[in-house]
Amino acid sequence: MEKFNLSNVSVMIIDDYAPMRKILISLFRELGINRLSQATGGAEALSLIKTNEPDVIILDAIMEPMDGLEFTRKVRAGEAGIDPFVPIIMVSGQTEMRHILKARDAGVTEFLAKPISARAMYSRLCNVISSPRPFVRTETFFGPDRRRKALPFEGADQRQTVHVYFSEDAAGVIATQAEARKAPVLPMKMPGDGSKWTKPVKTDGKPKKAAK
């Protein structure tokens, strides 16, 4: 796994359980991340995120009154000017596939099952940095591309819409119909692009301690 210097990464922790927030803060400091903010729930986080602008959001799935899924949907909808592309890593003890799929469909970037460890969290952060996924917009979904594998299918390709998105770094992306058949959904930008707030480092050190 590629090693990264995470000292410049800013992380917002959202969890209504104080002991879990304490565990996560300790875990991130172990990984060299000290730019940390925290919120006790989704509503508070929606207010804080406007001024803190974290690079990554870590949140629990089960919270009251706003759970992690509802919060994620609000972020992906760009509510109140929030950056809808911010990477979101959901931490949850609900590891059944139906819960993982709900998180994916809400727009979560990565899913991490409890109990968590520094190694597992580091792996998810590396995925966000080194392998950011393009965002997809459909009639019912906006978020990171949910397609992890290129699966074969039968029949004609029915994907015909060319999506042209704009970003801060480019005037736009223009695709022909032939190109659209190969990649019908184009990235608006690469969310979580670690090049702006971290860099690869050569080190043999690996996180070893587990958060219990």
Image (cartoon, rainbow, N blue to C red):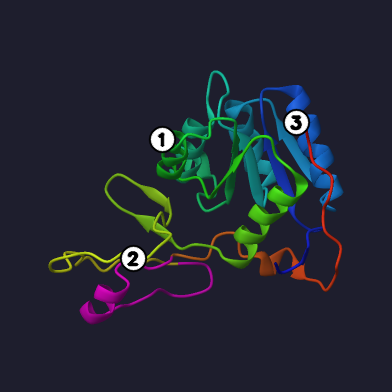
Q: How many marks?
A: 3
Which residue is label 2 attached to?
185
Depth check: 136 or 207 in front? 207
| Residue 146 place in picture, x, y as percent | 41, 54
Disc 3 residue crowd, few under 14, some 14–19, many 20+, Cα 10 Å? many
Q: Residue furthest left?
A: 155
Q: Does the magenta segment cover residue 181?
A: yes
Amino acid type shown at disc 1: Arg
| Residue 192 place in picture, x, y as percent | 60, 59
Label 1 SS:
helix
Badge 2 or badge 1: first in the primary sequence:
1
- Write the residue at 13% across / 69% down: 156
Q: Is residue 63 above or below residue 109?
A: above
Locate the N terminus and report the quarter of the image it occupies. bottom right
Q: Are marks 2 and 1 in contact (CB under 8 Å)?
A: no
Amino acid type shown at disc 3: Arg
Amino acid type shown at disc 2: Val
Which residue is label 1 attached to?
98
Locate the C terminus and report the quarter of the image it occupies. top right
- Write the residue at 40% across / 73% down: 172
Q: Is 10 placed left or right of 175 in the picture?
A: right
Magenta span:
167-187
Q: Which mark is residue 21?
A: 3
- Write the residue at 70% across / 22% down: 17
Instruction: Estimate the spatial distance between the alpha carbons at disc 3 and disc 2, rounded to whole Å.
Output: 37 Å
Instruction: Estimate the spatial distance between the alpha carbons at disc 2 and disc 1, rounded to whole Å.
Output: 25 Å
Q: Does the magenta segment cover residue 173?
A: yes
